[in-house]
Image (cartoon, rainbow, N blue to C red):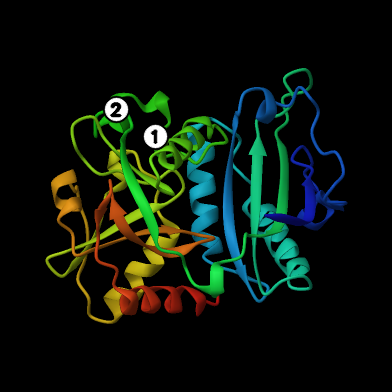
Amino acid sequence: MKTLTLHRLDLGSDAKAEDCLTSIDPQSALLTATDLSATRGDGIFETVVVVDGVPQALEAHLDRFERSAAMLDLPAPRRELWRLVVLEAAAALRIHTARGAVKFVMSRGDEAGDPVPTGWAIGFAPDSRPGGETPEVDVVLLDRGYRHDVAQTSPWLLQGAKTLSYAVNMAALREARRRGAQDVVFVSSDGYVLEGPNSTVIARIGGAYVTPPTELGVLPGTTQADVFAALAASGDPVETRVLDVAELRSADAVWLCSSTRGAAPVRSLDGEAVAVDADVTERMNGALNERTA
């Protein structure tokens, strides 16, 4: 990842959106040492892929940003301000790269100062894909340690919020590498499929494309939603429903969907080969690349 643009947001101002943005050097200091994003991981974020200067699925990402803010009792984001900073960063990215991304962040603020959130947006170029292709991935299943209904029984655990507290997700990815894989699918302690550390699961079962519901404490997948829209438009059946581990292991094909990676085909689960459907993968990513908003 190469950082190309950086914007700071003044979230304590009531001024017009354009007057609350400051473009700064991507290598310059942004946070204090006592900002709660650094000391506690207390905040939220979204990452929007940008193709030829156009942010993809921006409104869906803003919807999810607002949802996460509400779950963390953060101030409701000024939607026009966050939309503008993404558009500004995306326009600047177009000078540098045809395919980039914008990560926008709201921290609860400085624990030593006034309780005003800290906001910023980074425009960056993701790591390049080998040969320009979406890589096939080897995946391991890891127990998240919660029942599938934890979002209802224990909402304070913030399952389904996109927070800055990513230590567990990063630890899971390191465990995957120790097992000779590149990625993870989390499962509940009672045997249901959840999501990846930074992706949504799609499995093809009996000809239908299936993804787990958000009621299980998984993030609403913006990329998965656009893939499902494209599949449904082509007449393919899509379902959002609970999916157990046995069904996943017997699936015809499996994909992990995320903003920067698109739809990545899974080629193995816990060392067992999974069929890769290259034609459908190409169709999924072609639909994602053709989005204009």
Tell which tag, 2 or 1, sits nearer the viewer. Answer: 2
Residue 135: x, y in percent? 45, 64
Residue at (14% x, 51% y) in the render: 247
Label drawn at residue 213:
none
Pointer 2: residues within 10 angstroms few (<14), some, or many (20+)? some
Indicate left or right for 222 with 129 as reference.
left
Name the image quarter holding residue 12: top right
The mark tally for this picture is 2
Judge left or right: residue 60 versus residue 74: left
Q: Where 170 falls versus 53 (above or below)?
A: above
* Mark 1, secondary structure of its residue: loop
Q: Which residue is mark 1?
A: 159
Q: Are marks 2 and 1 in contact (CB under 8 Å)?
A: yes
x and y, in percent, of residue 222 in the image: 44, 59
| Residue type marked 1 | Gln
Residue 146's tag is 2
Query: Which quarter of the image is occupied by the N terminus?
Result: bottom right
Q: Nearer the viewer, residue 114 or 226?
A: 226
| Residue type at numbered disc 2 | Tyr
Q: Position of residue 160 (x, y in %)?
A: 40, 39
**Distance of label 2 from label 1 (alpha carbons):** 10 Å
| The C terminus sits in image quarter | bottom right
